[in-house]
Amino acid sequence: MSRRTATNVLDEYLVTRSQLGDSQAFRQLVARWHRLLVQQASHITRDDEAARDIVQESWIGIVRGLGRLRDPARFRAWAMRIVANKARDWIRRQQSYRRFTNQVEEAARMSEDLPAEDPAGNEIGRVRAGLADLDAEQRMILTWFYMEEMSVREIADVLSIPVGTVKSRLFKARKALRHRLEEE
């Protein structure tokens, strides 16, 4: 029996035992595959820290879906597919975030071009300064909602998050901006 075959048999055994609720077998499975899955995620994302987070999230998906894996011999491909999908999701979120950041920067440049003699200029300046004090995500969500007139649904789609999360983030961003403006 070749080493590769012995390795496959061991993985099948550990998967089967894990499916039966053997937590020690699952820990062994994690010990055997974690490093390889992190390497795969890192290769896809080119970000070691993100890769570790992605694999942690992937293990949650693996735990939840392990009982539905019908062929324990397919564990390697199945687990790697989960990691690859989560890594691609991470890349899409990063691209959305970069687009959002670019839009926020563009909106900031456009607002800087407002005429100084504009009667609302002082108020706009205060709001602009308040926005500048917020973190990038809060600036982004407020800019998209108010300046770009994106709907909550559109923002949720861009960020790949639930509508309720967008509403919550909008509420927190408005509150933070209000707090900044009241401090002045």
Image (spheres, rainbow, N blue to C red):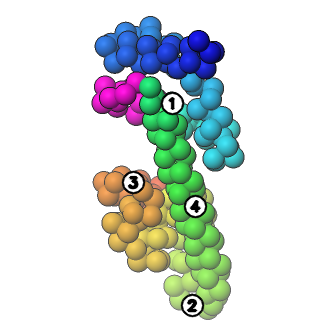
Q: Pointer 1: residues within 10 angstroms few (<14), some, or many (20+)? A: some
Disc assigned to residue 162: none
Task: Give coordinates of residue 84: x percent, y percent.
Answer: 53, 44
Who comes first in sequence, dot 4 or dot 2? 4
53 magenta-colored: no
Q: Which residue is mark 2?
A: 118
Residue mark closest to the camera, 3 vs 1: 1
Q: Which residue is mark 3?
A: 161
The stretch of residues the image draws in magenta is 57-72
Q: Image point 52% across, 77% down: which residue?
A: 123
68 magenta-colored: yes
Instruction: Give the amino acid at mark 4.
Output: Gln
Q: Quadrant of the N terminus?
A: top right
Q: State whether residue 5 is above or below residue 40.
A: above
Q: Decide: marks 4, 1 in contact (CB < 8 A)?
A: no
Q: Image point 62% across, 29% down: which residue?
A: 36
Q: Main secondary structure of the magenta part?
A: helix
Instruction: Give the amino acid at mark 2.
Output: Asp
